[in-house]
Image (tube, rainbow, N blue to C red):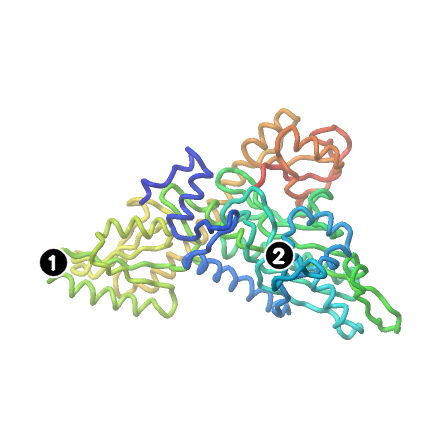
């Protein structure tokens, strides 16, 4: 199987597509720019959902669902919003064989629809805060698409909250950014940089946007999640008002935040190798695959008895599968499950039985170095420990990789070289024209202005003017 995968060093883009298709995460749909998420890919997405949903509910959020179709007049109510999304809108003008009185937009995001509903539901300060999340699909008419990273239709969650004060809303914005940081690091094993977006990169209609930025295996940046402080922009557009404790009418303060199936692509690109996927144990659809090895019928019965005992021991705590297919050789099965990124393989053969042991093989450590023998009667404890170690090691490797490819250039020449090979962490004046010129010169974008940085002053890496903040620049997906 792996011989059919284009090596990352040869063509990273082709490697990415090969792995997604051969590991059966997704395939191309008959509609250009859309994808079919296959069962294995959807199982990975379900685990992402579960990890996020658990955190949302722990912070007081509840799930709801809002319509897919949005009246065009809603989109047009917030000027910056319509300007930002107009090129990406899919619009329905005919329904039931008749011309619609008002065109309907297929949901690109839900601030407008939810703003309309919040205006109905919120009357008093007692109704606040409203903390709602929805799991949904959205459609954005993308011209250049890539499986999971950028498709015309994708799946995501979008949180939308309303608050009595600006302070509460801003606190919520940063709280949810922290939730994304925690999820990315603890479950996806992806180190991320939380930061503020530049004015140019701010979400259409937001006052301030924040994001988590990750470095992929080709040193390019990926925006893996966003959280937006919307101020009162949508509240004013949709008349979301409430009577405060002094019986005075006020506009609410709102936020929105989202993470999408793009996270699946991030996991592929951060951890994958030339043999296929490498999945973090906490999110892997299967954490352990057990492969029996035998040559004769007399060996088969004893091996399978031990295999099923191991499966029974693990199944209550571990997502485990036995691959007992007779029509494939053990070597073929090894390759298949390596392609699919299963974190841990357990091999049991006649020699293992004779020694009262099983062989554990780590997906993230190829060859003999990733193998070790463990006693059959202690297999559960050994598997627990191995999965925990894999999770930690994947994060550590990804962090080491990012740090090795993050530079602090001293002049613009070094800056150009830095963004061609990773991230540049540089002083920046914050001027939009300066940002645009950097993009034109280098194809790099302002990924974010990290929230955690040492206070100080410097000179803008491009124009040399005084700068009070440093930014992460990189070539981004």
Q: Are marks 2 and 1 in contact (CB under 8 Å)?
A: no
Pick the front one: 445 or 372: 445
Q: Quadrant of residue 43?
A: bottom left
- The image shows residue 42, relative to residue 370, as above or below, that is below
Q: Quadrant of the C terminus?
A: top right
- The image shows residue 459, relative to residue 287, as above or below, that is above
Q: Quadrant of residue 163?
A: bottom right
Task: Tell me the CA gap for discs 2 and 1.
Answer: 54 Å
Q: Secondary structure at mark 1?
A: loop
Q: Quadrant of residue 145?
A: top right
Q: Secondary structure at mark 2?
A: strand
N-terminal of the two: label 2 or label 1? 2
Identified at 37% across, 70% down, the residue is 316
- Residue 296's disc is 1
Report the number of numbered marks. 2
- Residue 254's disc is none
Pick the front one: 21 or 322: 21
Residue 161 x %, y %: 70, 64
Q: Is residue 127 left or right of residue 97?
A: right
Q: Is residue 459 left or right of residue 25?
A: right
Which residue extends farthest top? 413
Residue 337 x %, y %: 33, 52
Identified at 31% across, 40% down, the residue is 3
Residue 267 x %, y %: 48, 50
Residue picked out by circle 2: 258
Identified at 43% across, 50% down, the residue is 27
Query: In the image, which is nearer the foreground, mark 2 or mark 1?
Result: 2
């Amino acid at each position: 199987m792996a011989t059919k995968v284009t090596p990352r060093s040869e063509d990273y883009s082709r490697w990415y597509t090969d792995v997604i298709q051969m590991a059966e995460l997704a395939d191309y749909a008959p509609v250009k720019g859309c994808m079919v998420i296959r069962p294995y890919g959807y199982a990975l997405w379900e685990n992402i959902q579960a990890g996020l949903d658990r955190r949302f509910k722990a912070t007081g959020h509840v799930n709801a669902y809002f319509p897919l179709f949005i009246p065009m007049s809603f989109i047009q109510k917030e000027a910056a919003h319509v300007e930002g999304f107009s090129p990406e809108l899919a619009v329905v003008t005919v329904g039931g064989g008749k011309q619609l009185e008002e065109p309907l937009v297929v949901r690109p995001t839900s601030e407008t629809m939810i703003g309309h509903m919040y205006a109905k539901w919120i009357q008093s300060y007692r109704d606040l805060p409203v903390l709602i999340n929805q799991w949904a699909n959205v459609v954005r008419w993308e011209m250049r698409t890539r499986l999971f990273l950028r498709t015309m239709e994708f799946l995501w969650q979008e949180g939308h909250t309303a608050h009595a004060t600006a302070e509460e809303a801003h606190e919520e914005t940063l709280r949810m950014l922290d939730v994304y940081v925690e999820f990315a690091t603890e479950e996806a094993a992806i180190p991320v940089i939380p930061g503020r977006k530049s004015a140019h990169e701010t979400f259409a209609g937001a006052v301030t946007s924040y994001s988590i930025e990750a470095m992929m295996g080709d040193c390019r940046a990926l925006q893996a999640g966003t959280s937006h402080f919307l101020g009162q922009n949508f509240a004013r557009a949709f008349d979301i008002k409430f009577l405060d404790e002094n019986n005075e009418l006020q506009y609410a303060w709102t936020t929105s935040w989202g993470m999408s199936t793009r996270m699946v692509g991030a996991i592929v690109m951060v951890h994958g190798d030339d043999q296929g996927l490498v999945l973090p144990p906490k999110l892997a659809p299967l954490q352990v695959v057990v492969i029996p090895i035998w040559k004769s019928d007399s060996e088969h019965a004893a091996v399978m008895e031990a295999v099923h005992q191991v499966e029974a021991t693990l199944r209550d705590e571990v997502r485990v599968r036995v691959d007992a297919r007779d029509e494939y050789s053990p070597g073929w099965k090894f390759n298949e499950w390596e392609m699919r990124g299963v974190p841990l393989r357990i091999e049991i053969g006649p020699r293992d039985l004779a020694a009262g042991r099983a062989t554990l093989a780590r997906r993230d450590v190829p060859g003999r170095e990733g193998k070790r023998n463990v006693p059959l009667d202690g297999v559960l404890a050994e598997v627990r420990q191995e999965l925990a170690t894999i999770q930690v090691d994947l994060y550590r490797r990804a962090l080491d990789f990012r740090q090795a490819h993050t530079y602090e250039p001293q002049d613009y020449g070094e800056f150009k070289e830095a963004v061609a090979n990773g991230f540049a962490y540089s002083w920046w004046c914050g001027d939009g024209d300066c940002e645009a010129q950097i993009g034109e010169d280098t194809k790099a974008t302002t990924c974010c202005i990290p929230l955690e940085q040492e206070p100080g002053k410097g000179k803008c890496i491009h124009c040399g003017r005084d700068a009070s903040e440093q930014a992460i620049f990189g070539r981004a997906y």
